């Protein structure tokens, strides 16, 4: 997949796609294809850019500084993001740049998450199979956004990915593109 550099008119949006095998992913692949088709955001695929997982933190910081809205798109593995996103955050969002003295480069930007899960939505609530809601399980991302003074927005969640029909996926892809580009 190629990277588009066309942005939406209201907010420059960077979508960081973090899927270790995007080409084999029915859901995340389709969401990414929809954004590429619409040419409405910059798509940055971490596993494609860093197959060796050697992150160029300075290059990533320069990229982030160009955008108003950052979207992390990933499958929700073991109540978190794939490993490469955590490594990326540890390498890129550092003191003196993202937080602390002189660390204001993300301040005022918007952070959105787009996650997909194998479990159905009802499983992610008190009393459900996983015992916790998406909101509770995503708190570390909200806390990180707060720490760097970003605005954390409610996530886009696709649950029960194994049961999503082709028709539902097309509707979800359209909804996702709106989620990414809304003013």
Image (cartoon, rainbow, N blue to C red):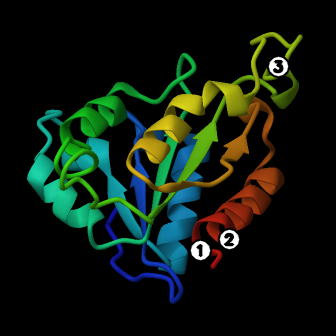
Which callout, 3 or 2, points at the residue further toward the start of the chain?
Answer: 3
Residue 177, how many percent across, how many down? Answer: 63, 68
Q: Mark 2 Cα within 10 Å, few/some/many (few <14, many 20+)?
A: few
Judged from the image, the secondary structure of the residue bearing numbered disc 1 is helix
Q: Nearer the viewer, residue 47 or 122?
A: 122
Q: Are marks 3 and 1 in contact (CB under 8 Å)?
A: no
Judged from the image, the secondary structure of the residue bearing numbered disc 3 is helix
Residue at position x 41%, y 42% in the image: 147
Q: Mark 1 Cα within 10 Å, few/some/many (few <14, many 20+)?
A: some
> In the rendered image, which quarter contains the N terminus?
bottom left
Residue 17, how many percent across, how many down? Answer: 42, 49
> In the rendered image, which quarter contains the C terminus?
bottom right
Residue at position x 57%, y 20% in the image: 79
Mark pair 1, 2: CA separation: 5 Å
Residue 167, how many percent across, how many down? Answer: 82, 55
- Side of 55 relative to 99 (left or right): left
- Side of 128 relative to 175 (left or right): right
Residue at numbered disc 1: 181
- Side of 174 relative to 123 (left or right): left
Report the disc number at residue 123: 3
Residue at position x 54%, y 16% in the image: 78
Q: Residue furthest front?
A: 101
Residue at numbered disc 2: 178
Mark pair 3, 2: CA separation: 26 Å
Q: Are marks 1 and 2 in contact (CB under 8 Å)?
A: yes
Which callout, 3 or 1, points at the residue further toward the start of the chain?
Answer: 3
Mark pair 3, 1: CA separation: 29 Å
Residue 76, how many percent across, how many down? Answer: 56, 29
Q: How many marks?
A: 3
């Amino acid at each position: 997949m190629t990277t588009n550099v066309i942005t939406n008119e209201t907010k420059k949006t960077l979508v960081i796609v973090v899927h270790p095998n995007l080409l084999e992913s029915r859901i995340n692949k389709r969401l990414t294809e929809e954004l590429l088709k619409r040419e409405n955001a910059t798509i940055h695929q971490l596993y494609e850019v860093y197959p060796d997982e050697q992150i160029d933190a300075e290059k990533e910081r320069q990229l982030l500084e160009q955008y108003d809205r950052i979207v992390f798109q990933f499958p929700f593995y073991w109540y978190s993001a794939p490993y490469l996103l955590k490594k990326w955050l540890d390498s890129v969002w550092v003191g003196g740049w993202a937080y602390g003295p002189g660390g204001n480069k993300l301040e005022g930007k918007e952070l959105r998450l787009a996650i997909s899960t194998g479990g159905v939505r009802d499983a992610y609530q008190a009393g459900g199979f996983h015992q916790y809601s998406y909101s509770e399980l995503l708190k570390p991302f909200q806390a990180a956004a707060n720490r760097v003074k970003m605005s954390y927005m409610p996530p886009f969640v696709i649950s029960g990915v194994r049961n999503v029909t082709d028709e539902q996926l097309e509707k979800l892809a359209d909804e996702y593109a709106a989620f990414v580009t809304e003013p």
